[in-house]
Image (cartoon, rainbow, N blue to C red):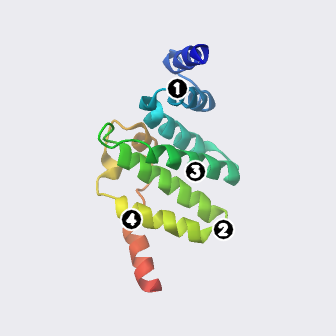
Amino acid sequence: MIELELIARNVLLSSAGPDLPNEVWACRTLVARTAGYRSRLVGALLRLERVTDSPVDRLRLAEEAVAHARLIDPDHDHHATDLLIWALHALQGSLYALGRTTEGRAAREEIAGRYHPGLHTKLGCRVTACYADREPPPVADWAAEAATAS
């Protein structure tokens, strides 16, 4: 395991920077022993999810990102809530794409409960920077849809 950790650290520290699959592998390897890499893993999983073509693979990556994001302690990482919201946003998009609307709605409801203004504008977070060209989750629209559906 120690050799794998050394290889994983070298992958992350390489001057060229790792490609996304290698970054995900390295972060998964390091998270097994050091929880401090969990935020970077969530970000890498979400960036990989965005460029993956297969809806099933996108769902798998989003589910993994949500699972890891839930384990990040907000007291130790001030981006924990942002990471979880972006992971849930990816998850709900994947669920809707696969026709799993009930589960997608549950993810949307959790986003609405955790969402805060300014999510989209925070700087210094790899995930927020990754999503900088996208609109923030349309929480107000979802709330309006839910109100009209009731």
The residue wearing badge 1 is 30
Q: Which mark is residue 112?
A: 4
Query: Where residue 66 sits in the image (x, y, percent)?
Result: 51, 49
Q: Secondary structure at mark 4?
A: helix
Quick one: 82 or 16, which is closer to the camera?
82
**Dot 2 corresponds to which residue?**
99
Given the image, on which type of amino acid does mark 3 rest? Glu
Which x, y percent locates residue 96? 60, 65
Disc 4 packing (10 Å; few <14; some 14–19; many ≥20): some
Crowd band around label 3 with a 10 angstrom C-alpha radius: few (<14), some (14–19), many (20+)? many
Q: In this picture, is 49 found above or below 107? A: above
Say the numbered circle drawn on residue 63.
3
Does dot 3 land on a helix, a strand or a loop? Answer: helix
Numbered disc 1: secondary structure: helix
**Mark 1 residue type:** Leu
Q: Residue at x 50, y 43 (%)?
A: 68
- Tag 2: Cα neighbours inside 10 Å, few (<14), some, or many (≥20)? few
Q: Are marks 2 and 1 in contact (CB under 8 Å)?
A: no
Left or right of 129: which side holds 74? left
Q: CA distance from mark 4 to mark 3?
A: 18 Å
Q: Type of residue at label 4? A: Ala
Residue 124 spot, x, y in % from top left: 33, 35
Q: Is residue 103 above or below residue 134?
A: below
